[in-house]
Image: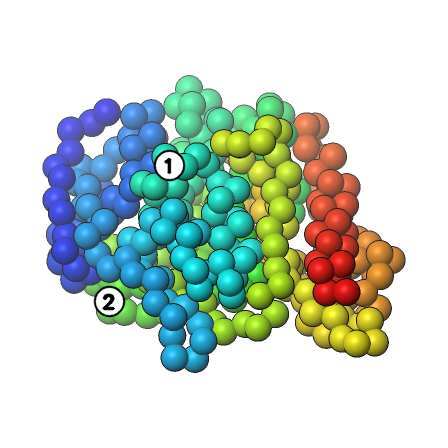
Amino acid sequence: MNLFTYERASDASGAIDLARGNAAARYLGGGTNLVDLMRETVERPDMLVDVTGLPGGIEPRADGGLLIGAAATNTALAADPHVRTHYPLLARSILAGASAQIRNMATVGGNILQRTRCRYFYDTAAACNKRQPGSGCDARDGFNRYHAILGASPSCVATHPSDMCVALAALDAMVQLDGPGGARRLPLLDLHRLPGDRPDVETELKPGELITAVEIPPLPIARRSTYRKVRDRASYAFALVSVAAALDVDDGGMVREVRLALGGVAHKPWRASAAEAALKGRPATAESFRAAAEAELAAAAGLRDNAFKIELAKRTIVAVLTDLKGEDA
Ligand code: SF4
């Protein structure tokens, strides 16, 4: 681990001032990913700016939505009564992630900005375009069971590891940012990038920008929603495939509204827009659910170890929607 200085900020402007003009500074939340990256010398900051003292409240908004301070812990968010009642898919996604000890430390802002768990990214002896642009990608012909089946590129087939972000993608969450150029808001779906030929550039954050809060809009459909994570073991494992979903079926058995997002399949949380479009106004039947899943996965491509995830994703979508329809009956 390299030498670094440690500073603690009590508000966003103080944090931004501390990091201003220093490309080697990093904002520190719970440290549950960044410290690991520093131990492996994948990240080599010369300054850590601790932002856990920034606002971390979880406040219902007047419009029925929710405002979550970026320093809120994952544990606090999953346990929040408003979240559990109005956005159960969000609470379930967080509880599906990591261990209780890590959730106690991890912050919402840090969860969003955690980096891939591709083993070659952490192995500084391996070729990895994300860690060292132009060096290659050892995952393509290596162990790629956890890698992407949608939106990947010849440069990188990594997946985004967050469960929480999959639920936020389904909910149309907005991210509040602050930085040297001022404050702004960005849809969560536009924050993370697909790898293209620059997998080292993972987000649309500008230099020195910081996530300060997450907004969730009011969404009545989300009261009946869920998150299912398919993984190799029951706890402390990343998703092979996950599905965040909400479903509203009218009295005639037709899909009035649906929200679907996938995790474990792409370089970013994957909103299943093709499946949603295929389902709206259609009968809420197993045949429609399967057709929607086929539409979403039509462009999927597998590698040596992960091609099974294409069918797994389809079946998980159908299973989750079938369960939600059952709740609606
Ligand atoms: Fe690196 Fe991406 Fe290839 Fe993994 S998949 S080795 S993160 S370039």
Q: Secondary structure at mark 2?
A: loop
The front one of 276 and 133 is 276
Outermost residue to the top:
125
State whether residue 111 is above or below residue 288. Answer: above
Q: Residue at x 19, y 41 (%)?
A: 48
Residue 230 position, x and y percent, is 64, 38
Viewer can see residue 31: yes
Crowding at dot 1, Cα within 10 Å, few <14 / some 14-19 / many 20+, comes out as some
Position of the C terminus, as image quadrant, is bottom right
Q: Mark 2 = which residue?
A: 181
Cβ atoms at labels 1 and 2 below 8 Å apart = no
Question: As drawn, is 17 to the left or to the right of 186?
Answer: left
Amino acid type at circle 1 is Ile
Mark-to-mark CA distance, 1 and 2: 33 Å
Crowding at dot 2, Cα within 10 Å, few <14 / some 14-19 / many 20+, comes out as few
Viewer can see residue 134: no
Q: Residue at x 49, y 40 (%)?
A: 97
Residue 280 position, x and y percent, is 75, 71
Instruction: State the mark number for residue 102.
Output: 1
Question: As drawn, is 32 to the left or to the right of 323?
Answer: left
User: Mark 1, mark 2: which one is toward the viewer?
Assistant: 1
Residue 200 position, x and y percent, is 42, 43
Instruction: State the mark number for residue 246.
Output: none
